[in-house]
Image: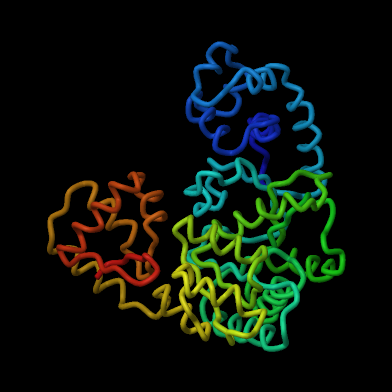
Amino acid sequence: MKALHPELIYQIGISLIPDIGPVSAKKLITHLGNAEAIFKEKANNLLLVPGIGRKTVNSIINQKVLSQAEKEISYIEKNNITPLYFKEKDYPNRLKHCADGPIMLYFKGEANFNIPKIISVVGTRTPSEHGKILCQHLIKELSATDVLIISGLAYGIDVCSHQEAMDRGLKTVGVLGHGLDRLYPAQNRKVAERMLENGGLLTEFLPGTEPDRTNFPMRNRIVAGISDATIVIESKASGGSLITARLAFDYNRDVMAFPGRPDDELARGCNNLIKNNIAQLINTGKDVMKSLSWEAQEPRERQVQKALFVDFTNDEQRIIEVIMDSKPHSIDEISLSSKLSISKTASLLLGLEFKGIVKTFPGKQYRIA
């Protein structure tokens, strides 16, 4: 386990302030520079931050949350948990582009959340045998590429995707709706223990947090935002997997779903996602890889040779350096790596596409043409 950041007590503390969510917390951090400064700033200056009222300022000033944060750090150290602060490099980059992404995440296991390929798989808690087979075949085909499988470690499709990923030699991470000191549902404990050696468990909730119903929509936004695409396998007309799919769509992520018979209750959610143009229709894992441009790409040497014949501005060169390797990149990834705004990145990519330097692929992916 890496050494804990000296500012960790303040980073956790800001996430514990009552009535302040990730959006307001990020405003405070942006305005004052870092988490520690928030707890050392004068009340009158805190009130100048847009959206921050007297009640929130009082909660910061009394600093009771820092005592709680200190206890959490002790638990983290004793249980080999990795805290992930949203400004650190190990924090999932894809979540950094979600306005409501958590300030803090807590991870137990071993996985890289910033690898090029991450897929979330969700679905009903009561799948049919056909749904389980679809899940198994999907993961089997995805195992042809180095992909991290994300799900929620719930009954049904979630646990099926975790198990199949491990059986196929892929790493898989379960996102929890409670603290790392417990497991819900308890029947999945053996799977969870195996996952700690083949991926891990991730949550934004501190130890002692029960698996309350209100926590799971919050959990779902992490499942949606942390991946390149969310795949739905069997869903009724309403349910958590549809919430995840719509969140992914709102985050500008790809959403895909397996279709089913119109009279099949377990197909209604997927069919509606496809019907309303929220999800792409897929039948196989190969469809997923094709949509995300995860096929074999041309050699890097050829890409470099193409780029040498054109003069670029400094900003264009920054874009090219990010996408010079053979794999496609999302606009979020390019913006983050090049340190350019999303709007600036989009404009530069369009210009490079007109020059024949950049090629756009399905799934909002870009690479050297």
Q: In this picture, is 140 found above or below 319?
A: below
**Residue in the image at 27% along x and 67% along y:** 368
Quadrant in which residue 175 is drawn: bottom right
In this image, 190 relative to 309: left or right? Answer: right
Q: How many marks?
A: 0
Question: Residue furthest toward the right?
Answer: 186
Residue 142: x and y in percent read: 55, 80
In this image, 348 relative to 24: left or right? Answer: left
- In the rendered image, the quadrant that contains the C terminus is bottom left
Taking depth in this image into account, of 70 and 49 the one nearest to the observer is 49
Q: In this picture, is 310 found above or below 289?
A: above
Specify how the rendered protein is coloured: rainbow
Residue 186: x and y in percent read: 87, 64
Question: Residue furthest toward the front?
Answer: 263
Q: In this picture, is 70 found above or below 165?
A: above
Residue 319: x and y in percent read: 29, 54
In this image, 199 relative to 227: left or right? Answer: right
Taking depth in this image into account, of 317 and 271 the one nearest to the observer is 271
Quadrant in which residue 149 is drawn: bottom right
In this image, 142 relative to 306: left or right? Answer: right
Taking depth in this image into account, of 230 and 67 the one nearest to the observer is 230
Residue 294: x and y in percent read: 42, 76
**Residue in the image at 39% along x and 50% along y:** 337
